[in-house]
Amino acid sequence: GEDVEQSLFLSVREGDSSVINCTYTDSSSTYLYWYKQEPGAGLQLLTYIFSNMDMKQDQRLTVLLNKKDKHLSLRIADTQTGDSAIYFCAERDTGRRALTFGSGTRLQVQP
Amino acid sequence: EPEVTQTPSHQVTQMGQEVILRCVPISNHLYFYWYRQILGQKVEFLVSFYNNEISEKSEIFDDQFSVERPDGSNFTLKIRSTKLEDSAMYFCASSDRPDSPLHFGNGTRLTVT
């Protein structure tokens, strides 16, 4: 079945860029998503990218997709303490409704 | 910004009891979903629902579970005869099209004792 993998933890200093990586196994992935989860809160959609795109930028967020390597990354520029959260990568297969999530990467931003 | 709302935020129940988790999806959305996250584990898909019927379900979603849209605004997940391993955070989500991103609620934490 599909699998999505992420590193568990990332620590950066405030003002630096953060890069969170994700790999997936499904060749039929059509959509790839990044969600943010703050403590005690739900899953907040940050951004998403279609599989026919290589890059998408949205303010401080840049998503890069390498389909050949099945690698997705989320870059957060000028990381702030408010960016501290768990970031989930998720993929959706063509023709399916279900999202497959990674384990989440805990981002810690040091002041 | 419209949001998905879930009630209650925390539900404690005894093993063997039935629980109903409630969700109000975003008003113009037609596709509804339930996911769960057992503590320390991945977010897992349970079921998707469209046009008053289940469109897809996972292996987790067995006869113990059911979903319903009892009226024009609510979407519920019923868990019968709860087990300790049903303890998890349950997330409801909705989307306006089948290929649109999902918008999630804040979740209901279910604790089975």
Image: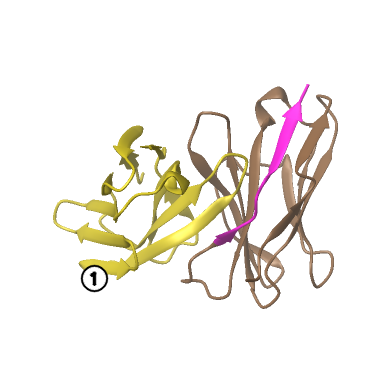
**Quadrant of the image for the N terminus of chain B?**
bottom right
- A93 sits left or right of B77 in the view: left
Residues packed near mark 1 inside 10 Å, few (<14), some (14 to 19) or many (20 plus): few
Q: Which chain is yellow?
A: A
Mark 1, secondary structure of its residue: loop
What residue type is disc 1 on? Met
Colour brown maps to chain:
B
> x%, y% of residue A22?
29, 46
Q: Which residue is mark 1?
A: A53
Residue sitting at the far left? A68
Q: Is residue B24 magenta?
A: no
Segment tinted magenta in the rendering: B103-113
Q: Position of residue A13 (x, y in %)?
A: 31, 39
Principal secondary structure, stretch drawn in magenta: strand
Q: Is residue A88 left or right of residue B109?
A: left
Residue at (34% x, 67% y) in the render: A59
Q: Is residue B65 left or right of residue A18?
A: right
Q: Which of the pair A36/B7 is nearer the observer?
A: A36
Q: Chain of mark 1?
A: A
